Image (cartoon, helix red, strand yellow):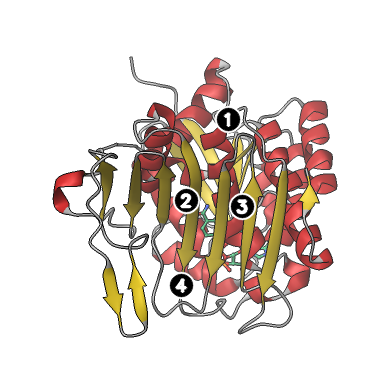
Amino acid sequence: MEKKKLHIGLIGYGGMGSWHARMLNEIPETSLCGIWDIDPDRREAAAAAGIHVYESQQELLNDITVEAVTIATPNDTHLPVALAVMSAGKHVVCEKPVALNREELAQMTDYSRKMGVLFTVHQNRRWDEDYLIIKQLYDRQSLGRIFNIESRVHGSRGIPGDWRNQKQHGGGMVLDWGVHLLDQMNMMLGSRKPLSVFAQLTNVTNEAVDDGFRALFQFDDQLTFLVEVGTSNFISMPRWYLQGENGTAVIHDWKLNGEIVMVSDWEKRDAVPVVTAAGLTKTMAPRTDETVKKYPLPEVHSDIRDFYRNVNACIHEGAKPLIQLDEVMEVMHIMEAVFRSAEQNSVVYL
Ligand code: NAD
C-alpha cells in the first residue's frame, strides 16, 4: 500500500536547504510544499528550480497543507524559528546543531511537548558509511579489545566566509562538525559514557570562533576516543583510526579507502632492527609479512532517505523517532564540556 505523503515546508534555502529540497522531492514519502528564505536571491534560486516560494514565513506557516517544517537556517536562528513553527501547530525537523546550548534545546523540547508536535534533528551523519564500518568493527570486537579510536575530519580552506565565522550566529567548528563527530561517538559507544575530556580549540585562520579543535575523551576500561576537526590541514590525516589489541583498522577518506591489519602470530620474534643514521630500534621495526594478515574493510550500506521516511512514520503512524532528543541533549552537554575544557586548559569530568 502506498504511504501517505508527508507535506513539508522548508525555511532556509541555502546550501543545506537546497539539499533538503532535492531529498523531499525525490522520495515518494514526502512532498515539498515550498520554501521561505529571507534572502531574495535564494528565493529567486528556488523559483528558478521550480519550487513554490512563499511570500513570508507567516504565509508558509498559515498554509494548512504544510504538516511539518524543515529548518535549515544559520544556527542562532533555530530557536526562534522552531518556536514559531511549533506555535503554528506544525512538526519540526531542525538542522544541526539544533541549538547553541542546553538551555535553548530544553526550551524547544518543552515547547514541542506542550504543543504536541514532533521535534527532531537532522543528525544525518549517523548514515555515513565510514562511521558505520567503524561502528561494526567496534560492535564485533573482531580486532580484540578496542583501546583507542580516532575520528578526524580535515579541510584546508579555513571557515567559509559566511555566518560560520561569526560567534553571534553560532559559528565555529565545534558546533559545525563537532556536533556530528560527537554524536557518532555517543552512538557508537552506546551505554559507555565518557568520564572526562581534555580539549583544545584552534584559531589559525579565525580569531572570533574556533576553526578546529582536538578533544580527547577517556572512557572506562582504558578506552580513549579522540575527536579532531581541522581546517588548515593541507595533508589530511585518516578519517578513522581504530586500535584493538590484535589489529588496527584505518579509513583514509570519504571514498572509504582503508584496510585492516591483524597480527597472526604474536609469538614470532620477527623484529629486524631498523637502523637509522643516529641509532637503531627493534621496538619500532615494522612487522614482517608472515606475522600479519591484511583484510579489506567490511562493506556496509545505508540509505539517508530513511531519515525522512522515519519522520513520516512518526507523524502518520506514531513510530519512534530515529533521532531521540535525549541523545541530542547528551551531545550538547559534551560540546559544552569541550568548550569548558579548552577555556580552562584542563581536564573536565563529565
Ligand atoms: P547557508 O548560509 O548556505 O544557508 C542558510 C540560509 O538561511 C540562507 O539562504 C539565508 O538567507 C537563510 N536564512 C537566514 N536566516 C533566515 C531566517 N530567519 N528565515 C529564513 N531564512 C533564513 O547555510 P547552510 O550551510 O545551508 O546551513 C544551514 C543550517 O544547516 C545550519 O544549521 C548548518 O549547521 C546546517 N548544515 C547541516 C549539514 C548537515 O550535513 N546536516 C550540512 C551543512 C549545513
Query: Which sits earlier in the primary sequence, circle 3 or circle 2?
Result: 2
**Mark 2 secondary-structure assignment:** helix
Which callout, 2 or 1, points to the residue nearer the camera? Answer: 1
Specify the amino acid type for callout 1.
Answer: Gly
Q: Residue at x 55, y 18 (%)?
A: 319
Q: Which residue is mark 1?
A: 190
Mark with earlier residue (2, 1): 2
* 300 or 216, nearer to the observer: 216
Q: Residue at x 84, y 65 (%)?
A: 344
- The quadrant where residue 162 appears: bottom right
Tell me if the residue at label 3 has its CB under 8 Å from ligand 1. Answer: yes
Separation (CA) of disc 1 from disc 3: 16 Å
Residue 328 horizontal side relative to residue 14, left or right: right
Q: Position of residue 292 (x, y in %)?
A: 21, 45
Residue 312: numbered disc: none
State the image coordinates of residue 233 (x, y, percent, origin top left): 46, 77
Q: Which mark is residue 20?
A: 2
- Residue type highlighted by circle 2: His
Asked if one can make out residue 254 in the rendered structure from this viewpoint, the answer is yes
User: Which residue type carries mark 3?
Assistant: Val
Residue 99 against residue 3 in the figure, above or below: below
Q: Which residue is mark 4?
A: 155
Instruction: Write down the quadrant of residue 202 in the picture.
Output: bottom right
